[in-house]
Amino acid sequence: MSSNRDDVKDFLVSRRARVRPEQVGLPAGPNRRVEGLRRGEVAMLADVSVEYYSRLERGSLAGVSDGVLEAVARALLLDDAERDHLFDLARAANASPVRAGRRSSTPKTLRIGLQYTLDAFTGGPAFIRNDHLDILGANALGRALYADLFRKTERPNLARAAFLDREWSDAFYPDWDVAADQSVAILRAAAGHDPYDRDLQDLIGELSTLSPEFRAKWGAHDVRRHATGEKHFTHPVVGALDLYFEGSRLMSDPALSFLLYTAEPGSPTADALRLLGTIDATERRDAARVADQTNL
């Protein structure tokens, strides 16, 4: 894992390179030698000295006030997820190093009441995951959606599946790059929020070692929230699925996210979900009969 100073430096440099002068009311000019804004331009927009901003961009966020962080976030046009990530990096820069290397506090099991809640939702796939992208529990349609993963393990990890099981992920995601970028951005945000999570560090190290694609995408320093939008899958049994998703943090445990997938009523995807539910119910019924006969 890289150091906090390296993460701060790479994040700020990458965000500065992304902002075009005209986006912040500055003349582009024909002779610009840098991609995006110059350091001096960010300093001017944030109302700090060039020397001070240069120190920030060298990775030193220790002692920086919230007001300065807000000003830098505005100057770099950071969205909410990126702003929160910047504040997380600053908190890590000011934290005691004694926390480093501690075991993760991220939940790895699900309370029975949460599983009952998942099971009560029958309108589409639903699941609960942690910030490591482990699926901790799912309803029947959620397990059917990710059936190939659940056949391999009771706690699938969506990042491992995307990068290390390419035969599955290339077939399952119509646009693999989009899905992979989303996984990396969620892990990057989690690492910024809790840089001392050793289990998360181990996961990132594993993916970085085994997947060149993960290493490249990790280096982009993109972060995101996974709250709402559309998902597109190609299920091996029922084919194309175009789903809407809504995600939220659990009030009882903010380290867990509840995700619901739904289809437009009357759409081919709605028909495909009904078919998937029927097939899954039949398979589970047949498996139960076989188990009962075996136990006789």
Image (cartoon, grey):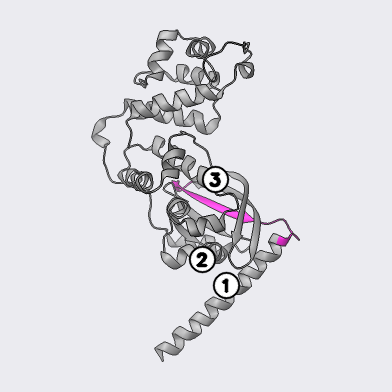
Q: Residues within 10 Å of mark 3 (few under 14, many from 20)?
A: some
Residue 160 percent across, percent down from the top left: 42, 53
What mark, if any, has residue 147 been given in the picture? 2
Q: Quadrant of the N terminus?
A: top left
Query: Which region shows up in magenta?
Result: 251-268
Q: Residue at x 69, y 60 (%)?
A: 269
Q: Residue at x 63, y 19 (%)?
A: 23
Q: Nearer the viewer, mark 1 or mark 3?
A: 3
What mark, if any, has residue 280 been given in the picture? 1
What amino acid is labelled 3 in the image? Answer: Asp
Asked if residue 39 is positioned above or below residue 138 in the image, the reply reads: above
Residue on which disc 3 sits: 177
Q: Nearer the viewer, mark 3 or mark 2?
A: 3
Cα–Cα span, label 2 and label 1:
9 Å
* Quarter occupied by residue 151: bottom left
What amino acid is labelled 2 in the image? Answer: Ala
Q: Quadrant of the C terminus?
A: bottom left
Query: Is 216 in the magenta?
Result: no
Asked if residue 85 is positioned above or below residue 40 in the image, the reply reads: below
| Between discs 2 and 1, the one toward the N terminus | 2
Cα–Cα span, label 3 and label 2:
22 Å
Q: Nearer the viewer, mark 2 or mark 1?
A: 2
- Count numbered badges in the picture: 3
Residue 21 percent across, percent down from the top left: 60, 16
Q: Is residue 212 left or right of residue 16?
A: left
Q: Residue furthest right?
A: 266
What amino acid is labelled 1 in the image? Answer: Asp
Q: Residue furthest bottom?
A: 296
